[in-house]
Every structure is written in structure tokens, then in C-alpha cells.
Image (cartoon, helix red, strand yellow):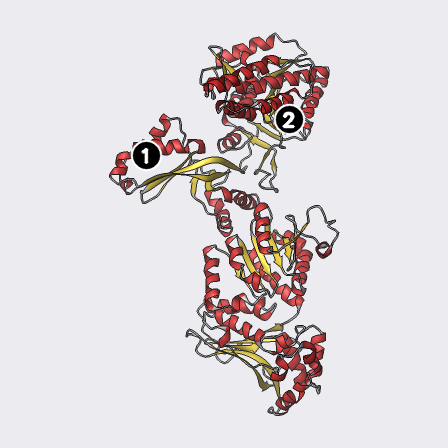
Amino acid sequence: MKILKFGGKSLANGIGLQNVIDIISNKVKKSEKIAVVVSARDNTTNILEELLEKSKQGYDISKEWEEFKNYQINGQLDIDYSNEFTLLEHLFQGVKLVEDYSSKIKDLVLAHGELLAIKLISKLLVDKGVNAIAIDSRKIFITDSNFGFARIIDDLSQDATTSIFKNLAANSVPIVSGFIAQSENGETTTLGRNGSNYSASLLAKYLQAEEVESYTHIDGIFTANPDLVPEAKIIRNLNFQEAGELAEFGASVLHTKTILPLIEKNIPLRILNIFHPYEPGTLISTENKQKGVKTITVQNNVSIISIVGKGFLGKKGIDGRIFKNLSDYNINVGVVSQGSSETGVDFLISKKDADLAVKILKKEFALDFYEKDVSSITARKDVSVITIIGQDIDGFTSSFKALSQNNIHILLINNTMNGRNISLVLENKDIPKAVNVIHEHIFGIAKKINIAVFGKGTVGSSFINQVLKAKHKILIKQGINLNIFGVANSKKLLLNSNGIDTNWEEEFSDKTNTHKANNKIIESKDAIKDIIEFSKTNNMVNLVAIDNTANDQIINKYEELICNGFNLISSNKKSNTSSYNSYKQLRQTLKKYNKKYLYETNVGAGLPLIDTIKLLHSSGENITRIRGVFSGSLSYLFNRFSSENQKFDSILVDAIKLGFTEPDAREDLCGNDVARKLLILARELDLKNELKEVKVHNLIPESLREIPLDDFLNNMSEMNDIYNKLKDNQKPNHVLRYIGDLSGDLQEEKGDLSVKLISVPKNSSLGQLKNSDSIFEIYTQSYGENPIVIQGAGAGAEVTARGVFGDLLRIADM
């Protein structure tokens, strides 16, 4: 014989209830011998409890009562529920009159959820030709009189069950109510939490069944709650010890008392999904000997009790006083943490017991309060427990690091005696993110980097397309899943928690709102706020925000992104060249929240300049000077002008047409861009310079600086005489170069920063520069007169985007 158990959600009106009837009917057709245990249907138990409480408070429950009855009847007008409904009405009326109810009355009311269920299920089965017989489990399960959590009297229940079942017809299908029983005095009792599953296990034990099939609304037991972790995997096999640990640490589909009767008789338990009944589910038995199964469970509805006092120091018996007093009130204690300084103790209890526990302990330690040995006893109720089952502390290092990187703070930690289970107490708000972080590390799931991109101009678009093109190769080779979940411009936001694809630009510009199922386009006045909210709603971890704009509004919200768990990457120079106080404040925030901020492209596009300078400086190398051609646009301009017999303005026109300059070339010619880059390098050396302290040679004649763009473009020839004279007045074999120069005593608080046009020998490193390349000379004490030279493409959307991509991979690998 098999015992089939159906949970409340499985029995809800509609497809669930129909599936239950079909499963039972199909097994009967196959001549399988079965008995069925059912819970109260859907939310029935909770509704009965609410009606009871409202009656106690004197409310009119007539409307809710009618809704309740209609749901239970479910269109089956030929089923006689009159006895059950009449008794419930009398009970509610009595409770309303006396304005109170006992645990005994509550058990009697709640029992009707299962009693109504067996009537309906058996009638529906009979209508399908199944010889179903409703069995009130009060006839077979005998308990003590501990209402609400009655304890089974095993020998009496065994005898009653055997007696009832041996008299059933051979072809009958018993439909047994779960959760409820009867005391030796004939009073209705209930078996407490998970009571229907417990009923099924007891029935299997007494009838020596071959297996229990427990049907729920999930496919089995997973490596984590799939509602929290979409990547969670089903566990096909568990042994009873592992299942017991799962039950102990909060797995919703298991409870310790459910497993014990099955262990006694070595009866396997299979967890199945009512909506996918032909899937194998999870099998729990003694046959499964595999080790190392790891599962993540979450216990909600807990509280931390904290007792703090200097009087604990060296005093014996404190723990005994705490636990004895709580035990006297049947309050169980979970994770315990006691500081090495012995000035306090923290422990977990059920949230429902928190206020009572504080009251009990304040009474016990009243004298200690008076003598100021105890300073406070408090309850913290906004916490939950994550337990990693099968994980030892030595193998948890990477998960600890990842939790810290994601701004998740552990309040308490506990490692069980066998060393195979780790429990972490966290704030409720951190639980979804923490479970995802731990699951990713424990189960070797590809590390997902969730990326929000601000700016979809030439650099932003190039970067996104580079990532999408390389995404699969990086996933295979490095085990990193680069997931761009958000793209924002100044007006709109494209969101997809599973990541955008190669059609993202078409989706972004689509005005018909006929987007792919997972894509979401919104008009956004505050893209950063919307991105943060979306990341929280979708429990995203390993967050990276990428700023490919030149927007002041975004840099002003960098700290908001950091505080909400984002690392930063930026091709936008403005943050690093704002006031020195703002610069330092941002670094303090990064340190506080353990976040990274990378900006290699701020100076040398895709060249490894900032990383090199950081490495030299942090290793103690004395950098004495940095100079070079910082602008690819101006490099192109002066490389051609120095080597060709062309007018200055004609080469400038070519540079504009090729996209080497901004649309208004004066933004390049004024020297501010080079000044910003130079200041960024100075600050990498811990210099405290401000942007206004950079001496800048503006290449634009004053007469052309403030006029409209069209007028400037029409009058650029005015610059020809100026630069022809500079070119002609050089020494032989010299060329013009527009450079940034950081010099002075760089061990002091500030350096000398200048941006200027100079003449250098053709055969020098600066003089040999070609095309639009940038070049940087780094002079150090160790290298003397021979600088470290870094040279390469210093401009272009593709090159800059590749540099941003490099920063992303650095963060992904941290």
C-alpha cells in the first residue's frame, strides 16, 4: 500500500482539485492499493482562525461566513455539510457571547477544515466510479489533551488504525483527514504544525506502507527556495539524516516529526508536485548514502534576544538562569552567540515568544539591573536564519567574501557540532540577496554580474555590443555571466532581469510598445532610482553601474548607487575632477560599503595607464614626473600639421569629419579635457590639486572662443597664421605636441600641473607619435632618466568601450 498525502494548496478549487481527483482515479485504474490523507483545502485553516478571532472581538462575520461556505461547497449541492456548518455557527456565536475561546474550542473549529475536505474529495471520487470512503482521523489517532500540539499515544493509535482498516472493503479507497485526532477523553485535538504530513507518516507506519507520496505545489526539494533563487536545482535523492537536518533548519515541506515514523519502519517519502505529477520529485529513504548534499534553507519568524551587562564578566550560571526560565515557559532557544569579552549573550527564539521572553528575563534579572550588572534585555524581530546544510566552515570562505562584497552583514553565526551545517542570522531585507550569493558560490553556478549601463551614445552602444558578442565565450571560459539588465539614456530605461539581447537598440527605440515578454521600457525621470528599485525587486547580486555619459546629474548620485550595493565603472571624468573634498568623500563611501570604482578610460581610453600608476605608487615607487600627449584628437591634429604641408584649419576640418573631436571642436582645443586627465593622474599620486590650479594653454584665439559654432567653423582660418608661425619658428627637426605635464615635488601635498603646446625633437618618444595615438611618459626615481612609456590608441568609441569592458572583467574577477 502507498499513502498519498495532498496539501492545502493542491486541493484549492480549480485545476489543483481536479488534478488530485485524476491522480487518485488513475492509480485506482492501475489497481494500486492506496490510502489518501488530505489537509484542509487552500486557505481554509487560516480563514477559520480569522473567523474565530473576529467572533471573539464581536465583529459581524456573516459576509465572510457565507463566502467560506460557498467555497467549501464548490458547486456540490448534493453534499450534506449541515452538521459541520451548524456546529461552526454555534461555536462562533458562543465565542462572540463570551468574548473568548479556549485552545480546546480552537482545535474543534480548526478541525472542520479537514472534515469538510474529506467529504468533498470522497464525493468527487465516488462520482468518478471510485469506492472512496471518508474516514474521520479522530477514530484512528489517539492523543493526550495538549490542545494545539497534541502528542500521539502510539499503541492506542496503532490498535485503532488496524481495527478500522481491516474492516474496509478490499477495493475501497480511504480518504483520511490529516491534522486532527482525539484525546482519550473523546475531545478533538490537533497535531500542530505540519500535522497533515505527520498524519500521513503515522498512517504509513501503522499500515506498514511501502511509500508515502506527498503532493505539494513544488517539484520536490531544491538546493534553495526557487522563489528566491531562480537557478535553484532540484535534489532527486536524500537520506533521512539529511532530510532531518533540512526539517530542523526550516525546510517548508519537511518537519522532524513527519520523518520519525518513517525512519522507524524504513518507509521512503517522495515529494511530488500536484501540477507535474509524473515528474520523479525528490525521494527520501535510507538507501541514499551520498554525502555532501548541500541545501540552503531559510527560517523566518525568529527574533534575537540580546542581554548585555558588564556583570556577566567572570560570573557563572548566567546561561543556566536564562535557559531554565525560558524552558519553564516552553520557549525553545536556537543559535547562541556569546562574546569573548563575556559582556553579553545573544540567542534566537521564535518571534511569537519574543515579548514574553523579554518580560521573563527582565523579571529574572531584576536585581542584576538594580546592581547595574545587566544594562539591557532587548528583542530584535527583523531577522531570519539562513542555514547551509552539508557545508563545513572551511569551504565557506568565498561565500563570506561574496556576502561582504554585496553589503550583507552577518549578525550571528553558528556552526553545528558535526561541522556540516552553518547558520547565519541576517536582517530580513538581506535574505533574498544573501541566499542568491551563497547559492552561486556553494553550487558552482556561473557568477552572475548584473550590469546597469547609463548612456547609450557611441561609447555606451559600443560597450554593450562588445559585451553581448563576448558573453557566451566568457561564460564558458571564465564561468562569469555578464547580465546587462538595464540601459538608460536621459529619458528612457530598458529593463530585463534576464538580460538584454542583441536586439536591444531596436527594442529601445520601438515606439509601439510591442516588446519582448521580459523587456520593460519606461519613461524615467530618475533612472538611478528606477535601476536601484528594479535590482532590489529582483534580488540582484554582484551589481555594477557603468557611467558612459558626461552627465553631472549621474556623478552626483554615485554615492546613492554605492550605498545600494553597486560597484562603479566610469568613462565620465567629471567625478574624479570635482572638488578634492568630493573626491575624498566618494572614496570614503566606497571603503565603507566595500565597493570598487574603476575608471581606466578616464585618461588613456583603453591603455593600462591608471593601473600602472596605481601599482607603482602603492608599491612605494617615487614617481617624479608624468607627461605626455593625453588627447587622441589633438594628437591627430598636431601629428599631421607637423609632418604635412597643410593649413591648420583644413586638418582640423578633417579631424571633425572623422569624429576625432567633439561636434564643437573648441571643447578639445580649449585644453580642459587634457587638464581633467592630468588632474586625475595627480590624484592617483595622492596630490590634493584642484582643477582650477591646472595651467592651461587654450589653443583657441580669444576672438573665436565665445562666438556661435557656425561662426567658429566659418572663421577657423584665423588660426592658420598663429600656428604657421609656431611651426616655422621651431628648431630644425622638431615637431609640435600638445601635452599635459605633472611635475614638481610630487611627495608634497600638491604638484605643478600644466597643459601646453611644446616643440620636441622628431626622434624623441613624443616626436615619433603617429596618427591619433596617445603617449605617456612616467618618470620614477628607480628608472631615472629613462621613463616608462605607454603608447597606443588614445581616442575612439570602440577603444574606450574596450577599456570599460576591461574594467568590468576586473570587477567580475574580484
Q: Is residue 102 above or below residue 450?
A: above
Res. 766 visible in picture = no
Residue shown at 69% from the left, 24% from the top: 18
Pick the front one: 116 or 660: 116
Residue 317, image quadrant:
top left
Q: Which mark is residue 12?
A: 2
Residue shown at 53% from the left, 33% from the top: 251
Residue 234's x, y, as percent?
Answer: 61, 36
- Figure quadrant of the N terminus: top right
Amino acid type at mark 1: Lys
Residue density around tag 2, few if under 14, some if 14–19, many if 20 or more, within 10 Å: some
Q: Is residue 318 left or right of residue 422?
A: left
Residue density around tag 1, few if under 14, some if 14–19, many if 20 or more, within 10 Å: some
Q: Is residue 534 above or below residue 84?
A: below
Pick the front one: 371 or 414: 371
Pick the front one: 136 or 781: 136
Q: Is residue 317 left or right of residue 304?
A: left
Q: CA gap, disc 1 to disc 2?
A: 46 Å
Residue 252's x, y, as percent?
Answer: 54, 31
Res. 15 visible in picture = yes
Q: What secondary structure is marked by label 2?
A: loop
Q: Which mark is residue 718?
A: none
Residue shown at 68% from the left, 61% from the top: 461
Q: What secondary structure is marked by label 1?
A: helix
Which residue in the protein does label 1 denote?
Answer: 362
Pick the front one: 13 or 59: 59
